[in-house]
Amino acid sequence: MKYCASPYQYISRKSRPVVIGDPSKGGVIVGDSNPIVVQSMITSSTLDTEACIQQSIDLVGVGCQIVRITAQTKRYAANLEHIAAGIRSQGSNVPIVADIHFKPDAAMEAVKWCEMIRVNPGNYADTKKFITREYSEDQYEEELKRIEEEFGPLVEECKRLGRALRIGTNHGSLSDRIMNRYGDTPLGMVESALEFAMIARSRNFHNFKFSMKSSNPKVMIECYRLLAARLAELGKDWDYPLHLGVTEAGDGEDGRIKSAIGIGSLLCDGLGDTIRVSLTEDSPNEIAVCNDIISQIPKITDTENIYPDLPLSFDPFDYSRRVSLEIALNNDIRCGGEQPIRVVVVEKSWIEVSPQIHAHDDVRPEAIYENLNLLEVDPREEFKINCDKQLVTVADGLDIPVITAFRLLAARLKSLRKCNAILLKDSLCFGEEALSSDIALLRASISIGSLLCDGIGDAILIRGEGDAKKSLKLAYNILQAAGCRSFKTDYVACPSCGRTLFDLQEVTAKIKLRTEHLKGVKIAVMGCIVNGPGEMADADFGYVGGAPGKINLYVGREPVRFNIPETEAVESLVDLISKHNKWIEPPKDISKTQC
């Protein structure tokens, strides 16, 4: 299966137009070679009309082109009439998307007032009780008929009113029916979405797009690749647009890095028509990051040159780390094989940061670039390797995109049957003006993060960030976000919406303050139950809004403590971590542990 036209050259995937609202009056057309559309979601309660209007106008003011608002029940959905009217009275015709989970009657109300309805196939007409049962073929078909009875009327209303649909599968909320047949897999996510698409198509409705979201960039990338490949297999008329996003990305640098890895890598492969960066921050912050990611794609891809069309060295639909031989770097550090992916710095940076490193620090340079036994090659040309213990990389100064270059390098090594370890670089060309730190972060995350999610790379070198200390920290943060190395606590934090039952930004900050020293522990912070248990499947502990002012705590996807007062919940979480033998006391001066 092919998921894109070429993994070595930027060729945009062709998609049909999906019309959201009236384009002559502020609506948008997604797909059909139109520029990538950026969107976000407000965080106010949908019953707070004035707050929703103001937040929507604020988003429009910073360039948001589609505004999403949650509608958890029919009562909430009915208030979308007043919110939409208020937004229009402010002079904006920005399309409004109603976010629907669990309640088909809420969707049937929201479709009266909103230009698009987002449905989640995992919970629109299905259940999520983590129940294991076997379905015969007849029973499975009966379930599909039941789903069609629930979903079909919404499709008919969208068709009658000229609305659009987003069929949005979430990794954290696959139905029990899908889980039991396909498992918690990218294939399950894709098949879940296709079932709903087939219902829409059976009614001759085509004004819809897909999304495949996960908090894990690797999973998210695999899902979209598999979806694109399946759509191509189904035929040319399955060319529906794709909305990209890493859900529950978190905040700060970590949220931006995760989003850049997931969204940016797919954009570089020509996939994606709309995007959202989901940050646990004020919603307008998301739009700037969206625009920055989009702006970097033309600068790190190539639409003109033709590169060798070599067989890929990796399976794009199933992650595994590339097999390489273990070697010694220029000290006692080992690289390749099953060793952690190492962090290399240039000598100037080594001299600058080494005096600031303490014995217990996890963030530290592990090798000096200038001292490596390194073979630098042009992967566009054939080359020979005479030493299996030599580290290999792409030569500086080549006019070739980083992702293309290292995919070609890995493909050449595979054709030579060589397992040399590979050093990844975020940049091959120098001499241009220095990048700002926020752009250097995104560019390195897209380029190196994409390759790491391909399974390529045994060591990384970042040079786009000029500050040695920031560059070192960025390297480790990219490794953590890509799921390649853990040096600190990992957080899965949702971006907040009208369903959220507590102040996510404030609570996330409190949890980080108490737990950020727990190396190798993953904590999920969820505002409500919509994606909670499923999206926390690979988290060690979960902090989830259960009711106003009340918190439920999870171990993995299992709830273990219920209705804890919010004022006591953070300490209860610490106690839970301690009872599972994953708590350690923080160092006396924690600032010294973070470079």
Image (tube, rainbow, N blue to C red):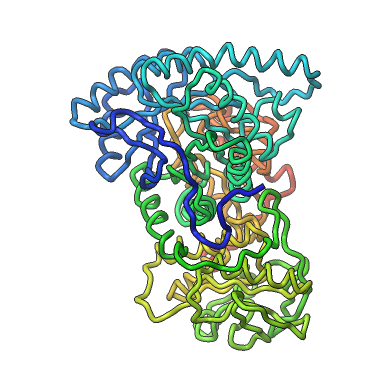
In the rendered structure, the answer to whether residue 83 lies left or right of residue 188 reads left
Q: Nearer the viewer, residue 351 or 220?
A: 220
Q: Is residue 28 above or below residue 146?
A: below
Picture quadrant of residue 584: bottom right
Residue 352 visible in the shown view? yes
- The residue at 78%/19% (across/down) is 137
The image position of residue 266, as x and y in percent, is: 53, 51
- The residue at 41%/26% (across/down) is 164
In the rendered structure, the answer to whether residue 259 lies left or right of residue 41 reads right
The image position of residue 315, as x and y in percent, is: 70, 54
Q: Nearer the viewer, residue 465 or 203?
A: 203
Picture quadrant of residue 75: top left
Picture quadrant of residue 385: bottom right
- The residue at 59%/79% (across/down) is 378
In the rendered structure, the answer to whether residue 89 lies left or right of residue 460 reads left
Q: Is residue 289 above or below residue 398?
A: above
- The residue at 66%/43% (across/down) is 539
Residue 567 visible in the shown view? no
